[in-house]
Amino acid sequence: MTTKANIIIIEDEKNICSFIERILEPQGYRISSAYTGKEGLQLITSAHPDVILLDLGLPDIDGLEIIERVRSWSNVPIIVISARTMEKSKVTALDLGADDYLTKPFGTAELMARIRTALRHSQNRASTQSSKYEVGDLLIDFERRLVKMKDQEIHLTQIEYKLVSLLAQNAGKVMTYESIITKIWGPYADSDNQILRVNMAHIRRKLEENPAEPKYIFTEIGVGYRMRED
Ligand code: CA
């Protein structure tokens, strides 16, 4: 099973949100919309987007501030959408870490092209070492978002996949609970490890023959997790 890319739209003009949804949903993307900056930030920490489409002119929080906040903990591609044609806000948005810029009104082809580019960039960033993790009977294909155990596809939730691929891309290294939580759930997440433990238990049930004696993802007690390297 390939996991569909998850896109968040933060935009107070509802007709623009629905315009974008109508374009992207038939392409198989999963879309969530937020109409305020506050809702948007909550959505970013809960929905784990692959791309964020962000309007700069929001009623509560300035879009530039949202970029700044998101960039303090995430490299998720941000495409700014705005009616502001001023050169200054474009540059500021990009300086703050936005990846691309769309000026309203924009067309279907332009939107699709920007999204494809953003997804390609995020995949390249994620797979700097290798596009695959192959250890023992476990295969993870990062490009296709596919996980197989002994040639059988393993069905992971979005969050389980993100956890497994994060650990696999850092195979051999101990990843602390805190760094994992920050990378997956963001800095606004509860700092207790309960949600991480629960997800890890589910992952082990799916990946490990005997979850009590894991062969792929090891617990470093009191520290974090380490994924087998070879
Ligand atoms: Ca607006």
Image (cartoon, grey):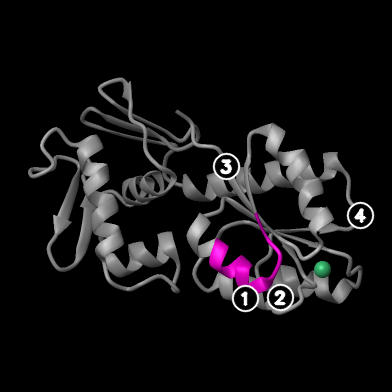
Q: Position of residue 115 (x, y in %)?
A: 70, 45
Viewer-side residue, 229 vs 188: 188
Specify the quadrant that holds the C terminus. Answer: top left
Amino acid type, callout 2:
Leu
Q: Residue at x 62, y 43 (%)?
A: 120
Displayed-image quarter of ligand 1: bottom right
Q: Residue furthest left?
A: 213
Amino acid type, callout 4:
Pro
Q: In the rendered view, would you say 29 is above or below 39?
A: above
> Which stretch did the figure color magenta?
33-43
Viewer-side residue, 6 vs 218: 6
Pointer 4 or 1: first along the chain: 1
Is any atom of residue 113 visible in this view?
A: no
Are the residues tagged 1 and 2 within 8 Å (C-beta)?
yes
Is any atom of residue 8 visible in this view?
A: yes
- What label does residue 68 carry, if any? 1
Q: Residue 149's quadrant in the figure?
A: top left
